[in-house]
Image (cartoon, rainbow, N blue to C red):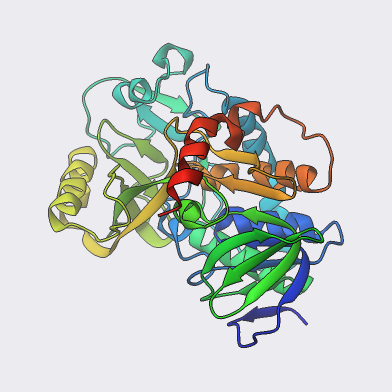
Amino acid sequence: MPVISTPDSTTPESFDVLLIGAGIIGLSLARELSSTGMRVALIERHRAGSGASRAAAGMLAVSGFPSSSPLVPLALASGELYPEFVRQLEAETGMQCGYRQIGTFASQAAIERHGGDPAAHEPMPPLAEPELRSAGAWYSLPADHCLNPRLLCEMLLASLRRRGVSVVENCAAAAIEPRPQGGFTVTAAPQSYIADQVIVTSGAWSSRLAGVFLPVIPCKGQIHALEAPPDLLRHVLLGPDVYLVPQSQGRILAGSTMEYTGYDDRTDPETLARLRRSAVALLPALDSARTLETWAGLRPDTSDHLPLLGEAGQPGLWAATGHYRDGILLAPITARLLSSLVRGLRPEFDLAPFAPARFAPALTAGRLGGNG
């Protein structure tokens, strides 16, 4: 029977694959693996989809990478997968996630800040956003789409329920230990699990597991949600110092910050007020908008801002974490790539730039110093 549960037994359960972390990456990967006939389970320290996935704005920014970035092929492939990914989930669950192929308009400053070339893009058509008030040039990024990541996580959970995948919430994994006879024991509170293969999909918490060293750094982002007339904003806007994302019923998200403050996920009134001022500077009609919600989340970053995808120190132990600002976008392609690795198949893209082994010197230091 499909399960979304809280652990209540001390008897270890055994699975083909155990994923540690039920954010967008873990949920998508569990769904992909379940379609291969494997017995799959996820354990999650809080509620499924409650971390960075819930805090994300939901931009699918396939155009947001410098042309030299090794992430470009993955981003383009994942963007192409998204329409069918969402269509299948909608058909399977009867739910929707607000997926909108509306495109993005970006200021010259925003494109240059992300290492892009404004000349590579078409200018924004006149009056495409009648309420926009901003000096300087704006450009069109038609391949960039958006969705509501909270709803997407709910769809994925519903899909996993239908497939009989076990998702155990409020279960904090503490350590991964190889078993003499093969496979791994994952120690969690209040029980342990046994699996032939383990995938760390713990986002910003990936560095806190004993038995594996994954140098993931929390990067806080704060978001201000505002209420506006339904058609005030028609596209995603990437401004010089704020982005605006339209959702259903006039809800507009203004974000986001990049703060390296450890595991502090509290919001700051002054920072949120600054986001609101920047939003109003772009869309003056937001000046009287009511605040609907504010929040902060912790993105999983790495020192080179590239994800950790691949073997994590020993056969059968994998990493799919460190996606930084792009976890929502890269979820479908990450699921396909890691599913191939788990099944012993050659992935469709070269994953060498994302191999956890690229941090080998830090890995040695981490083993000597422990995982604090």
* In the displayed structure image, the side of residue 203 where residue 313 appears, left or right: right
Q: Residue at x 43, y 11 (%)?
A: 119
Asked whether 211 or 13 is in front, the reply is: 211
Q: Identify the residue at horizontal 82%, vertical 58% (top origin).
A: 35
Q: Quadrant of residue 11?
A: bottom right
Residue located farthest toward the top when viewing the structure as drawn: 119
The spot of residue 330 in percent (x, y) is 59, 42
If the image is split into quadrants, where does the C terminus sit?
Answer: bottom left
Q: Position of residue 323 (x, y in %)?
A: 51, 42
Is 354 placed above or below 34 here? above
User: Is 12 above or below relative to 36?
Assistant: below
In the current view of this chain or complex, which residue is farthest to the right?
A: 37
| In the foreground, 325 or 146 | 325
Q: Nearer the viewer, residue 79 or 311?
A: 311
Q: Residue furthest bottom?
A: 8
Across and down, in percent, residue 243 comes to 33, 41
Q: Residue at x 29, y 44 (%)?
A: 260
Is there any visible trace of residue 148 in the rendered image? no
Q: Quadrant of the N terminus?
A: bottom right
